[in-house]
Image (cartoon, rainbow, N blue to C red):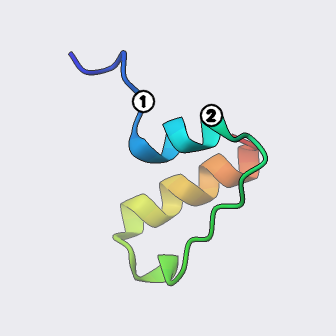
Amino acid sequence: MGYEEGGQLTEAVRRKPFSVVLFDEIEKAHPDVFNALLQILEEGG
């Protein structure tokens, strides 16, 4: 349920693939969120 629709961030980047996404103060996020984001960025997405 709900997996057909993308999230706000993913849909915005999908519509404009050359976007720049700035994660200001991401180090303050929950460690699980921070680590997941780092893993995604390391893998290239």
Q: Amino acid at mark 2?
A: Arg
For marks 1 and 2, give the CA distance.
9 Å
Circles 1, 2 touching at the beta carbon (< 8 Å): yes
**Which quarter of the image is occupied by the N terminus?**
top left
Vertical relation: 33 (above or below) 22: above
Q: Residue 31, image x and y in percent?
A: 39, 69
- Amino acid on which disc 1 is placed: Gly
Q: Residue at x 41, y 60 (%)?
A: 33
Q: Earlier in the sequence, mark 1 or mark 2?
A: 1
Q: Is residue 14 above or below residue 9?
A: above
Q: Which numbered disc covers residue 35?
A: none
Most foreground residue, 35 or 5: 5
Dot 2 falls on a residue whose secondary structure is: helix
What residue lies at 62% left-to-right and 47% top-to-bottom?
Answer: 40
**Does residue 22 appear left or right of residue 8 in this picture?**
right
Height in image: 19 above or below 14?
below
**For this view, does 17 lie left or right of residue 4?**
right
Residue that appears at 54% across and 80% down: 24
Disc 2 designates what residue? Answer: 14
Circle 1 is placed at which residue position? 6
The x and y percentages for residue 42 are 73, 52
Please state if 38 lies on the left or on the right of 36 as rendered: right
- Decide: few, some or many residues near mark 1? Use Cα within 10 Å; few <14, some 14-19, many ≥20: few
Number of numbered discs: 2
Say what secondary structure mark 1 lies in. Answer: loop
Give the residue furthest to the left. 1
- Crowding at dot 2, Cα within 10 Å, few <14 / some 14-19 / many 20+, comes out as few
